[in-house]
Amino acid sequence: MLNPELEITPEQFEACQTGYQREFGAEAPLVIVEHQKPRADGLGFERHRHLVFAECLETQRVLSSRFMRMRNEKVARLCELAWEHPLTSGKHNDQVIQYLDASPVAEMKQAAARLKQAFWGEEVPLQATFTDAAHQTTKRRAGHSVLPAMRAELRRLWQEAGYVLQTFVERAGDKGYQVKSGDKPGVWLIENSEGYHLALHRVLRLRRQDLEELMEEQDRPMPATLRKRRRIKPELLPPLPETPAYKTYMEELADIIRPPWKRSECRAELLARPYLREVQRLEKRTDAEILAELLAALIMRFLEFLFGKKVEIPPLTAQEARQWIEKEAQTRAQKRQEAVRAHFEQADVQAALKQRRSLRGCLVSQNLAVRQAMEDGQFQRAVGLLEGQKQSVSGRSLQAEQAPDRQQSSRGDREI
């Protein structure tokens, strides 16, 4: 944001470049671009230079960019003080002054004192005169655009008039400008003798509502005329207390909503946990106990082979037992999850869920009829009133959305 109003020498530019490198820890700039561009207000030095620094340094570190705008303003103000140029007011004046004042270097403290005397508490962000869209529009025109110079002149007249609209209009009239109403309602234009015009509220940096107020009191200065608009929030009624009857009714709805299985009872790993503990206990058996179980299993196999008797043989290893348990737990958990899903798909459960949500909304409703019904214990009536209120609001919104379509349709019918 170095915005010199006077010409700078090559030595000054080199000092400025060194200041930026020292502040941000940057290396030598990759590219230096110099070009000439006339100012819109005709003031200031027209020749500018742009520095392009590498973001990734040779040390494989990234260029420091924290608080970049404030640090940029600090370097720019120090350069202007060193060169004895007119000081430029920025957006972060106070932060720059506080940073310089906290420095142990005496020169920095002196700079902070001079800046504080110049504009302490004044923060004016520098903005582009036109947006990108406005620049593109200007490029499509033949010749040079007069709008930037026109805007700068009008803003200078507005400042000289002491921000009094009547005085501004008179002085602008002496310069050949004329204020007239625009095509859109509430928009005023200011036009020069050649037919170029600008929106008056944008030239004066005002809102449309502020300009309308100034139109009613044109002989008074702007700060005394405009009042700060504050949205007055309506006072909301406090939520209703939960009465014993309300809690009992909500419990009845909860009994309808409550599924046959809890969420934890539908998880396979939780179902298998107690049985796996039994497997761990069996793993601690002695050799004699294991040998006896193996012998019993062998006898069962012989009985099946000799006499055709079908006997269920238990698992012989802990790993085999774990597989059986996990498989059975997964099957049982899946069945429970399907039962819970089917439970919540029932119509009476969905109705109970909807009614419970509505009852909670009735407690904080601002409708007096709904609140009275809740206090009387008429919960069904309170829900009906609340639903009717929502339907009426949605109906009005739908009508408002369909109104432009109906107007367009009727206009088309008339044209046909």
Image: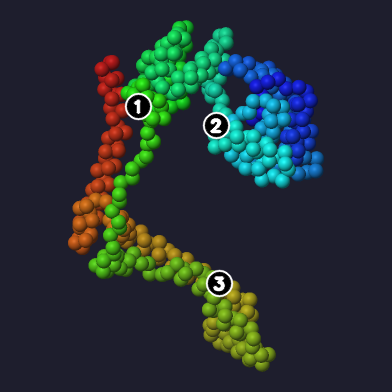
Q: Tell me the mark number nearer the camera, choosing from 1 and 3.
A: 1
Q: In which quarter of the image is the C terminus?
A: top left
First in sequence: mark 2 or mark 1? 2
Residue 360's x, y, as percent? 31, 58
Give the distance between the C-alpha atoms of the residues marked 3 and 2, in whole angstroms: 70 Å
Q: Real-space Cα distance between discs 2 and 1?
A: 24 Å
Q: Residue 124 carries which label?
A: 2
Tell me what residue is drawn at x 55 percent, y 19 percent: 135
Residue 410 image point, x, y percent: 26, 22
329 to 354, vertically: above or below: below
Q: Foreground: 29 or 346?
A: 29
Which residue shows up at 59% across the image and 73% down it? 323
Q: What element carries label 1?
A: helix
Callout 2: helix, strand or loop?
loop
Q: In this orientation, which residue lies closer to the viewer: 203 or 218?
A: 218
- Mark 2 Cα-neighbour bin, 10 Å: few <14, some 14–19, many ≥20: few
**Position of the N terminus by quadrant:** top right
Q: Residue at x 56, y 9 (%)?
A: 142
Find the residue positioned furthest to the right: 58
Q: Earlier in the sequence, mark 1 or mark 3?
A: 1
User: Is residue 373 or residue 223 the one in the foreground?
Assistant: 223
According to the image, label 1 marks what residue?
A: 213
Where residue 351 sits, quadrant-wise, is bottom left
Relative to 84, residue 306 above or below:
below
Residue of label 3 = 326
- Give the amino acid type for the residue marked by disc 2 in the picture: Val
- In this picture, residue 65 sits left or right of residue 126: right
Please name the amino acid that badge 1 sits on: Glu
Where residue 90 sits, quadrant-wise, is top right
Residue lying furthest top in this view? 194
Sequence order check: which comes first, mark 3 or mark 2?
2
